[in-house]
Amino acid sequence: MNTKKIIGLLAAVVVVVFIGYTVYSSSNKEETLSVRTDEATEETIVETLTTTGILEADKTQDVYGQGVVSELDVAVGDQVEEDDRLVLYQDGTAQTAHFDGTVTAVTITPDEVDLSSQTGEAAITVADLSHLKVGIQLTKSDAPIVKEGQSVTLTNGSKTFDGTVAHIDPIATTTTAQTGNTTALAATVEFDTPPEGLYAGFDIDVAITTNTAEQAISLPIEALLYNEENQPFVYTVENGKAHAQTIETGIQSDSAVEVKEGLSAGQTVILSPDEKVKNGVAVTAK
């Protein structure tokens, strides 16, 4: 074999080795997944139930009468004081205000018959608009976790107010609408301090604190997964590889989950892992 053939053969071997190395290196790089990570921490986790409530007058008086109206003493928007006369009937019967408030509805007219007792629609409504409360409706799944005395955050636009669950009805009621029947448990939230700039009849956002875990191991909710047995688990990062770790969870907030067992503060977890992330796969943080 002459020199030129030997040189050509060596060159061919070098090319094959180079190509093989390149393919091997590329395949290794492809096996290392780039993932987003975060750490489990120790903090207080607050679990809340969010819903929408309706601002209501703290006290409301509905007046029902019968007979011909002789004198109507009020109109919508009038301010009245306790014991002020509201209406006088031809038989001499009068209806008076039970408290200081505002007349919010009038459905009767002088010299005409008051049919409110028959129709069920109040002749006159007086409301104490200086003291507001919030009415909420609890679903079948929400009702068991809401208790009287729980703290509430009420939000109207950029304003927030502190409140407390003050009352929960003993039984649920069913209302009928065109879309079907709805059964709910009515509850009332009171403001801790009388609010300003709010009006009865409008809705308001309600966040009820249903549970709190102090000094808990907190896991970003993006890291939580469930296996085929519906057991919660996460992928931790150990020595550059993904490790599937089963955990026991507790309460959760909008962004975090309490971990009772299986994870310690400071451990690195993979956020929103896709189907490529498997137990033992090499990973690197983005």
Image: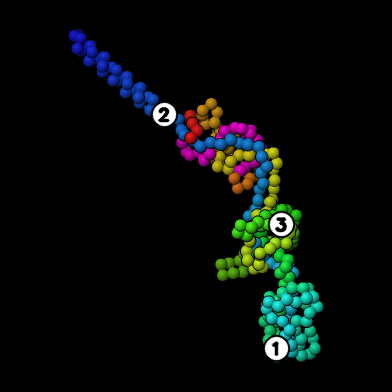
Sooner in the amino-acid sequence: mark 2 or mark 3: 2
Rendered location of residue 17, percent (x, y): 32, 19
Q: Quadrant of residue 192?
A: bottom right
* Vertical position of residue 236 compared to residue 15: above or below: below
Q: Secondary structure at mark 1?
A: loop
Q: Quadrant of the N terminus?
A: top left
Badge 2: residue crowd in 10 Å (few <14, some 14–19, many ≥20): few
Q: Tell me, for residue 194, which label it has, or none.
A: none
Q: Nearer the viewer, residue 105 or 156?
A: 156
Residue at the image point whose x is 18% and y is 9% from the top: 2
Residue 14 placement, left or right of 90: left
Measuring from the top left, give residue 97's x and y in whole percent. 77, 77
Looking at the image, is mark 3 or mark 1 earlier in the sequence? 1
Residue visible at 45% across and 30% down in the picture: 32
Q: Between 21 and 193, which is closer to the camera in this rendering?
A: 193
Task: Return the mark for residue 110.
Answer: 1
**Residue 239 appears in view:** yes
Question: Which residue is the extreme one toward the front?
Answer: 196
Q: How many residues crowd around disc 3 within 10 Å: few (fewer than 14), some, or many (20 or more)?
A: many
Looking at the rendering, the stretch of residues picked out in magenta corresponds to 256-279
Query: At x 76% / y 90%, what residue is drawn?
Result: 90
Amino acid type, label 1: Pro
Q: Give the alpha-carbon distance from disc 2 to disc 3, as whole Å.
A: 56 Å
Query: Counting other residues with Cα less than 10 Å from the Cα at mark 1, is it few (<14), some (14-19), or many (20 or more)?
Result: some
* Residue at numbered disc 3: 163
| Residue identified by numbered label 2 | 29
Judge depth for marks 2 and 1 and give the one in front: 1
